[in-house]
Image: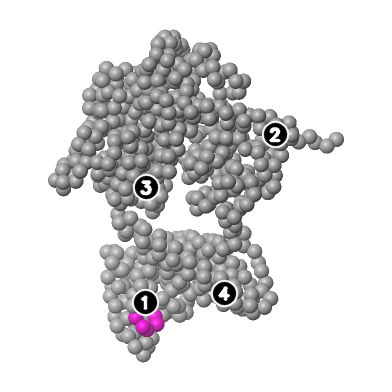
Amino acid sequence: MEHKKTLLIQNDLGLHGRAAAKIVELSRKYKSKLFFIKNGYGEVDGSNILSILTLSGSKGTEIDAKADGEDSLELLEELSRLFENKFGEGR
Amino acid sequence: MTEQVTAENNKLTGIAVSPGIVIGKARLVDRSKQKIIYQYLINENEINREVERLKYALEVTKEQLLDLKSRIPDSIKEHSFILDTHLMIVEDNMITASTINIILEERINAEWALKKSVQKIRQLFDQVDFEYIRDRINDVENVVERILRNLVGKKQESLSNINEKVIIVAHDLTPADTSEINTSMVMGFITDVGGKTSHTAIMAQALKIPAVLGLEKATVSIEDGNMLILDGYKGEVILNPDNDLITSYQEKALYYKNYNSSILQLSHLPSETLDGYRVAVKANIEFLEEVETAKENGAEGVGLYRTEFLYIRNKGVPVENEQYQDYREIAEKITPFPITIRTLDIGGDKIFSNKKPSNEANPALGLRAIRFCLKEQEIFKSQLRAILRASAHGNIRIMFPMISGVQEFIDAKGILSQVMDELEKGNIPYDRKIKVGAMIEIPSAVMVADILAESADFFSIGTNDLIQYTLAIDRSNENVAYMYEPYHPAVIRMIMQVVKAARNAGIEVSLCGEMAGDPFCLPILLGMGINELSLTATGIPQLKKLIRSLSKEAAEKDLENILKLKTSEEVRRYIQKITKDYLPDINGNGFKLKYLQ
């Protein structure tokens, strides 16, 4: 099953090293495959740290997440919590 | 006319770290960054082999990173995410799948394919708008360098396979290299980098292999198979010597061999002057492995144990238990002699790898040694606990480095007694009467030595720093290095003042800088009545022999005269004159003193 969700990057530093690492860790817990789609960048693999870093995701940017697999809804649910909580960075 | 190649222009100068003269063939060992070559793969077998090599290298890299991660000390566990990031990079499709694709499609070797993958990644990173993300390319390159090393690593020549007598010439040698060396075949070490306290130096001394390090361009100037003379006394290497030169060095080698065995025989006799004055001669050491060398050379204990190595090796604060084990083992090994442990003598920038190099304008005058420890009390306490716990197993003394005045020393002792109280409450054994001393290496401490002596159990004069701070000379600055002058009247008076203060207060005073091993300084220090000299272990036999040939009474008279002299040059001339009688071994044999140090 494929699901999509639009996420807003809210932390000051954007999708930097530690945030990207947290996304990779999260994606590994699920059976579904995770992708990100950003304007002008096409679709990239959400389980690869370098793909996420080179998306150049800054604060205030919207980004589409797509998950494909049996637990895709749960994956997107946890992912959007991670984005909302600013990757635990506080700001 | 053909140009004459003389020995003079074939002489390379470096740092003498392990004494001895050897003559033999060079064996060049390449340990520098591997050059990546392009290789076109002709058949499917080769292609499969390259894919397998890559997979293997990735697997090894992953294991190494996991291993590193597991060894991170608890105190900096929070920084282990950098290793997590590196692990993710090793597993990233842009590295793994992409490189395998390039091998398959372009039929090229794994190294070259990996290089192409990195180029692609770099292009993507170049387009990132934010510098702090763009900079992550450094992590990628760091990881790729590691993968490359593992790719080529299998081809590296192991030093254990050497089966003819050679002198090893390398850019640098790793601890792994030196530990697997075949000592019956390797006659000497020559490296481009490294100095007196490098691991290679320590290993060379322990293995009794002559070594000259820090030659900068040895691997460029010397070719595999060249004939070499390695002079580990002077720190010189002579390339393609003629027969006359070889003969004269063979004679010198024989002379030193005889001389050294004669002084080694004496080295276990007490270090006592002709008129019965005892000076303890001890070793400065940094690694556990050095204890054996120290004992063999007749050291009566360790006068300075530098503790920085554990912190630098760990790239962070070692856990208390690791320190405790280290201190305990070293104290047990040197028993029944005492060991003086110097607490941490560096700043935070040298300990924490995640910190940028110190941004202090003048780190020598900045936050380091006891100042750093008084600020970072948790780090300090954990070291003190480790030392105190170890003190139950040997004769340990503690000294605090870079003490600038009484308050600082009292503050440091205050923390020590807090730690003692904690141990007391926990019923953990330690030496309640442990001696606590101050290192005297800052001129202000010299000026207040009389009142500092009221709260210290002993003084240890660190002359290397004391000379630098007194004369305002940075020894590593080549513009002023020539002014670094142990015979400067100010330096002699400083030391005199400290020795007097200690004597008046009835406490012991030792000296642990390079001056301790300088035979020319010996009459001055004996004249003052120094109680202990601590120096590099290999210098001990000679120093003991010299002490046994001097008289304290004569040294006192000479000191009186020296104190009246006005310039370093006058002091030097005076010492040279008197050493004709004092140091017959040195002046009588026709070789320069430098040889024997």
The subunit letter for the residue under badge 1 reads A
Residue beneath disc 3:
B311
The subunit letter for the residue under badge 3 reads B
| Magenta highlight on residue A50 | no
Label 1 environment density (alpha carbons within 10 Å; few <14, some 14–19, many ≥20): some
Relative to the observer, which residue lies in front, B131 or B572? B572
- Residue A86: image quadrant is bottom left
| SS class, disc 2 | helix
| SS class, disc 1 | helix
Q: Disc 2 and disc 4: Cα gap in Å?
A: 52 Å
Q: Residue at x 52, y 39 (%)?
A: B208
Q: Quadrant of the N terminus of chain B?
A: top right
Q: Nearer the viewer, mark 2 or mark 4?
A: 2
- Residue B492: image quadrant is top left
Residue beneath disc 1:
A28
Sequence-first disc among 2 and 4: 4
Three-letter amino acid code of the residue under disc 3: Tyr
Circle 4/circle 3 CB separation < 8 Å: no
Q: Residue at x 42, y 9 (%)?
A: B557
Q: Which mark is residue B51?
A: 4
Q: Which mark is residue B246?
A: 2
Label 3 environment density (alpha carbons within 10 Å; few <14, some 14–19, many ≥20): some
Three-letter amino acid code of the residue under disc 4: Val
Task: Tell me: B412 left or right of B1.
Answer: left
- Residue B498: image quadrant is top left
Q: Please provide percent x and percent y for residue B419.
A: 20, 42
Q: Disc 4 and disc 3: Cα gap in Å?
A: 39 Å
Sequence-first disc among 2 and 3: 2
Three-letter amino acid code of the residue under disc 2: Ile
Q: Answer above or below: position of B245 versus B24.
A: above
| SS class, disc 4 | helix
Circle 1/circle 2 CB separation < 8 Å: no
